[in-house]
Amino acid sequence: MIKKKTLGHWGVAAGTCILLAGCAGLPDRETPDRPEERAAHEGRATDAPVQPMLQTSSAGAEAEHLRSEAARAISEHSVTGMEVDDDLWTRVRRGMSMPDASDEDRVLQYIEWHQEYSQYLEQVTARATPFLYYILEEIEARGLPTELLLLPIVESAYLPMAQSPSQAAGIWQFIPSTGRHFGLESNWWYDGRRDIHASTQAALDYLTQLNERFEGDWLLALAAYNAGQGTVSRAIQRNERRGKPTDYWHLDLPRETQHYVPRLLALQAIVRDPQGYQVGLTPVPDERRVQVVDTKGQIELAVAAELAGVDKETLRTLNPGFKRWATAPNGPHHLLLPADRVTDFHDGLSQLDDGERVTWQRHRIRSGENLGRIAARYDVTVGTLKEVNNLQGTTIRAGDHLLIPSPGTSRQVAAGPDQDNRPTRQVEYTVKPGDTLWHVARHHGVTVRDLVRWNELSTSDILRPGQTLIIRTGGEAVSA
């Protein structure tokens, strides 16, 4: 095993490229023979070097506290793996059951990468800390290997807003079709693929199915999670016809999948023995940080935050699946809250009148309607409609939507992650050759600072053709 900090013969560029060459999505599992399934994973593999993702997300007061706590833990404990009695990683080690492949060349490559970029794990851990205990509990409750807690590091670096060129989204990187198959709704209000609670349940359901499909072989199950079960099954059949071994290491799989499983196994080796590999592993308290609560119906996020006694940005950080100022009318009716705020939330919710839960409506503009008619219908002023919908003039278009405040309400709409106190419209832009952060920001009338913040990038990042950027605008949707 590698016991010293060295890149050896692998080199920095190759390791960086393969580890961070885009989020691994879930191709369409139900139709593995589709051409688009092959295009999905072929499009994600790249030989172009990219910069390591060493930045953390903008996450509000609670997340900032967690980052500070992580930094303090690094200073108080050895960054090379000194255990503490209540460290969550100790619990993870006890539940590991996947094969040890730390002597495989492909695994060694990624161990060496983490040795060179040890700050990466520190920052990912700081970002993931609110969710690690919750996800680990769900894994243990199903009797699954605790290494699965590390899979979102491979998939998304625990970035809920991560999105791949094949439209895989969330920390578990579901594409839309697979998300729908596992009950993850996606609509104007909500994207279940970004919901930490819902997507974790779906991912563990799917991984359990794959493990059963491949007769308990977790390496084949993980390969299928990345490339599709049809792709893995056909690779097995080819080897059977040729009289070759059918284990993961001998299969002819897509290039990304050949490196996907080793990336997880490298993390397994490091978590098992961080001191031996000299890789910083931030201690994580083995205690509940968040808890799922039932909102018993639609509720404004600003109201929920007030009841729980947390700021709106913290609530949105914990609940990235909700795209608007309120939870979806038809559900899901749940939120993740800091565990120590749940009692206050329930107490406040029990005393809340139904009319106080949501003070905004969504109006679909019909043919022939104008702002004056809509304002009169809802007993608000035209000026108010223009202000809350960020309209420069009075021109509206049939089929679009307007946010309608209740008459006399004093509560402003809770904005999206940009927190500009105005309702925002989210669009997705596909990066074209030659695009830079400055060009994209200028074209869409936003600042580079906001573009970087919305997509959890750094100003030094180089955009890749095919990469998807999230852009928030208060006006008409921008053509991508």
Image (cartoon, rainbow, N blue to C red):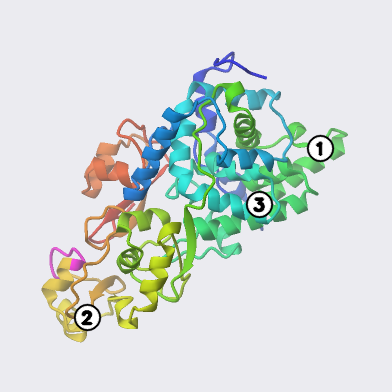
Residue where numbered disc 1 is placed: 246
What's drawn in magenta, residue-wise? 388-394
Left or right of residue 403, residue 116 in this image: right
Residue where numbered disc 3 is placed: 140
Q: Looking at this rendering, what residue extends furthest in the front direction?
A: 85
Which amino acid is tagged 1?
A: Thr
How busy is the neighbourhood of tag 1: few (under 14 within 10 Å), some, or many (20 plus)?
some
Is residue 183 positioned above or below 358 on the image? above
Q: Earlier in the sequence, mark 3 or mark 1?
A: 3
What is the quadrant of the N terminus in the image? top right
**Closer-to-camera residue (174/286):** 286
Instruction: Measure the alpha-carbon separation of dots 3 and 1.
Output: 29 Å
**Closer-to-camera residue (30/126):** 126
How busy is the neighbourhood of tag 2: few (under 14 within 10 Å), some, or many (20 plus)?
few
Is 146 magenta? The answer is no
x, y (%) of residue 36? 58, 50
Identify the mark at residue 369; answer none if there is no mark.
2
Q: Residue at x 33, y 47 (%)?
A: 454
